[in-house]
Amino acid sequence: MKVNKRNHFELACKTLKLDPSKLPDVSVLLEEFARPVIALYKLQVIIKAWNGSWVPNWNNSEPKWCCLWWMDEPGFRFFGVYDDVSSACSTGGSRLAFVSEKLAEKAGKELDYLFADLMGGELPKKSAA
């Protein structure tokens, strides 16, 4: 399966031997709360597939890479990455940490639509040039 912007989840499910049609049941949630729950689940599956066997250990000083975001006009967009060694402050949470700067940057650029759903932002509108 060729990678495109919207099939990362399906590819990750294939890697982890998961059924991509089985999503968390959000039927009892308000619609505005359902979207971030589904986005978080999809991000966690993709990140687990991309990180392989690596799991962040917050009890040591190894770098854990996270995405940074910027939200204003014209909308929600990727800002950069940073490594969080032991800070109590986190922009993404331990389940959204990456083993490398390269993977964090890839996620910030390619998974922006899922991060926007998670954080309640809207992606900038593409100009019809």
Image (cartoon, grey):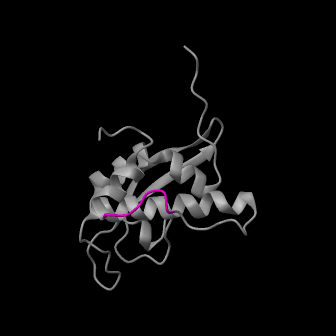
- Depth check, front residue: 17 or 48: 17
Q: What is the x, y in percent for residue 92?
A: 49, 65
Q: In this view, does 20 lie to the left or right of 2?
A: right
Q: What is the x, y in percent for residue 47?
A: 36, 61
- Depth check, front residue: 11 or 125: 11
Which image quadrant for residue 57? bottom left
- Depth check, front residue: 117 or 12: 12
Q: What is the x, y in percent for residue 73?
A: 66, 37
Q: In this view, does 46 lie to the left or right of 63?
A: right
Q: Quadrant of the N terminus?
A: top left
- Depth check, front residue: 21 or 32: 21
Q: What is the x, y in percent for residue 43?
A: 45, 59
In the rendered structure, does residue 8 fall within the stretch colored magenta?
no
Q: In this view, does 99 lie to the left or right of 36?
A: left
Which residue sits furthest bottom? Answer: 59
Which residue sits furthest right? Answer: 30
Highlighted magenta segment, given as a residue range: 17-22
Q: Which residue is drawn at 26% across and 74% down?
A: 62
Q: Residue at x 31, y 63 (%)?
A: 17
Q: Is the magenta stretch mostly helix, strand or loop?
A: loop
Q: Judge whether 119 appears above or below 26 on screen.
A: above
Q: Which residue is drawn at 65% across and 66% down?
A: 26
Q: In which quarter of the image is the C terminus?
A: top right
Number of numbered markers: 0
Q: Which residue is drawn at 53% across and 63% down?
A: 23
Which residue sits furthest top? Answer: 129
